[in-house]
Image: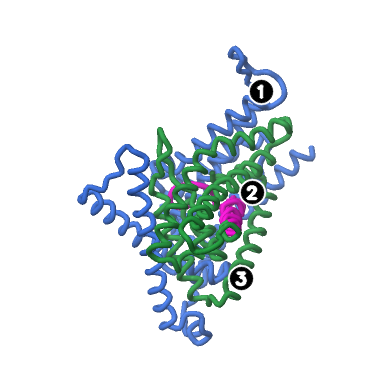
């Protein structure tokens, strides 16, 4: 299914971001089951592989383990279960489960947002979303140079190994290898940034004439894109209204 | 160290974005007023953000393990005012590529890490008396060490203080302190790493040190 790939980026990103924020608002345990249902339906509709989702969950799950342990052990309230000196509190367990469900659901929407956004024309579309031009330019160029400098790092590691500069077990030896590696990468980055600066100036970056000369043709988003925007906004508003209603009840 | 999506209340996320927007605007304005034009800001922030992104893949030894450095202090020393927008963009790519941090919490994470970089830079400038090697080592160590601690305290405070009220306030404060103490070995390792990198750069490309 290419539902999300065909959704215009300048509408998709704000809509899904709003949905993430509205899901992050949910605190009531009765509304919590809605979040993984919404996330699961959208994830299936996106057609993204499950392996991607599981790989992206690794870092947050470690974080959530620590947070959950803290919540379960140090919350006040009724005792749920006691293992010798270790006491798990009911309110803490509910809070830990709610937190995990909410965090993983919101992360799923973020993964859909990023991994269904094509790179072509991204710069123009981000600028139409009123993100400052300078930040968009920094972002696009950073993405490009992560690949370039990442390749340089791989080559350096290989060259280092071939010359026998392996970190080894001693801390002094390890610092003796990683410090020059890191510093050399930074020096290469600095020199590259100077070349990029000269190239940008030669191409007239920042001048009014150069900006007027950019002809990013404006493509009006399709009706389907607007419909999906409306549906997503309606879902976000529904979640917000439900949370406020339950809170005030 | 980075707060994932869904952890924080929406009002904190919105405040984080507002604060980051204001600080980004201020940092770019300060960078421009020290005669950096847009092209230099974009080229320096983007390519150095990419370089730091890759350097964060280098493992610092912390027996019995190795850890990824945070690099807030080093970024502050090398990029100055531009460190904040560079960190903001770097955090976006960490969230997009590895799932570290989040998109709704990007503002808060940027304020924690970017704010730590700027504070570390201020500390570096205060402590660096001359362009001698000893001065660079001491100020570099202080910046690296402080960068980690500032970031941990900021993140820990935001997390603990936004947890609902089932938790005793005294325990909340103890938890933040415990996080800071648990990160002391990392702060020491990163202080040493930053000092040694700064000394290397002093010998090879001294103009890189702000």
Q: Is residue B94 above or below residue A58?
A: below
- Asked if disc 3 and disc 1 are in contact, CB closer than 8 Å, the reply is no
Q: CA distance from mark 1 to mark 2?
A: 26 Å
Residue B84 at what x, y percent from top left? 56, 61
Front residue of B194 and A85:
B194
| Residue that mark 2 sits on | A22
Residue depth check, mark 2 versus mark 3: number of the one nearer the observer: 3
Q: Chain of mark 3?
A: B
Q: Chain of mark 2?
A: A
Badge 2: residue crowd in 10 Å (few <14, some 14–19, many ≥20): many
Q: In this view, which residue lies farthest toward the left?
A: A162
Identify the element where label 2 is drawn: helix
The colour with which the image depicts chain B is green
Asked if one can make out residue B66 in the rendered structure from this viewpoint, the answer is yes
Front residue of A225 and B99:
B99
The colour with which the image depicts chain A is blue
Q: CA distance from mark 3 to mark 1?
A: 51 Å
Please state the extent of the stretch shown in magenta in the rendering: B96-123
Residue A187 sits in which quadrant? bottom left
| Residue that mark 3 sits on | B30
Report the residue at 58% width, 74% height from top: B34
Residue B135 at what x, y percent from top left? 51, 57
Q: How many marks?
A: 3
**Residue B47 bears which disc, if any?**
none
**Residue A90 bears which disc, if any?**
1
Residue A121 at what x, y percent from top left? 44, 69
Report the residue at 41% width, 44% height from top: B60
């Amino acid at each position: 299914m290419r539902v999300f790939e065909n959704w215009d980026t300048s509408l998709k990103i704000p809509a899904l971001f709003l949905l993430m924020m509205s899901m992050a608002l949910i605190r009531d345990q009765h509304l919590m089951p809605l979040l993984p249902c919404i996330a699961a339906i959208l994830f299936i509709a996106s057609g993204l592989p499950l392996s991607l989702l599981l790989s992206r969950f690794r870092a947050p799950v470690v974080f959530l383990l620590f947070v959950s342990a803290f919540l379960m052990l140090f919350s006040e309230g009724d005792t749920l279960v006691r293992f010798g000196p270790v006491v798990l509190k009911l309110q803490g367990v509910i809070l830990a489960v709610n937190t995990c469900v909410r965090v993983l659901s919101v992360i799923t929407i973020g993964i859909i947002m990023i991994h269904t956004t094509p790179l072509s024309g991204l710069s123009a579309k981000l600028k139409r979303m009123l993100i400052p031009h300078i930040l968009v330019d920094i972002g696009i160029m950073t993405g490009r140079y992560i690949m370039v400098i990442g390749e340089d790092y791989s080559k350096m590691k290989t060259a280092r190994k071939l010359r026998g500069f392996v970190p080894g077990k001693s801390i002094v030896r390890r610092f003796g290898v990683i410090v020059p590696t890191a510093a050399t990468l930074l020096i290469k980055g600095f020199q590259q940034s100077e070349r990029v600066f000269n190239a940008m100036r030669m191409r007239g970056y920042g001048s009014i004439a150069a900006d007027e000369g950019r002809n990013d043709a404006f493509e009006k988003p399709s009706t389907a894109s607007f419909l999906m925007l409306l549906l997503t906004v309606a879902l976000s508003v529904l979640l917000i209204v439900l949370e406020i209603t339950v809170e005030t009840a | 160290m980075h707060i994932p999506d869904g952890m924080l209340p929406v009002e904190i996320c919105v405040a984080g974005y507002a604060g980051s927007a204001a600080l980004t605007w201020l940092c770019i304005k300060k960078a421009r007023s020290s005669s950096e034009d847009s092209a230099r800001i974009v080229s320096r922030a983007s390519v150095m953000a990419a370089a730091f992104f890759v350097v964060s893949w280098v493992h610092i030894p912390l027996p019995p393990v190795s850890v990824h450095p945070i690099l807030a202090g080093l970024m502050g020393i090398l990029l100055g005012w531009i460190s904040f927008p560079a960190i903001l963009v770097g955090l976006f790519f960490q969230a997009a590529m590895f799932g570290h941090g989040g998109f709704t919490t990007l503002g808060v994470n940027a304020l924690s890490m970017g704010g730590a970089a700027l504070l570390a830079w201020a500390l570096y400038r205060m402590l660096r008396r001359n362009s001698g090697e000893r001065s660079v080592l001491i100020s570099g160590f202080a910046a690296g060490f402080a960068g980690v601690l500032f970031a941990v305290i900021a993140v820990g405070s935001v997390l603990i203080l936004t947890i609902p009220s089932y938790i005793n306030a005294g325990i909340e404060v103890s938890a933040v302190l415990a996080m800071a103490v648990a990160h002391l070995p990392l702060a020491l390792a990163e202080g040493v790493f930053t000092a040694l990198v700064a000394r290397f750069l002093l010998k090879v490309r001294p103009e890189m040190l702000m």
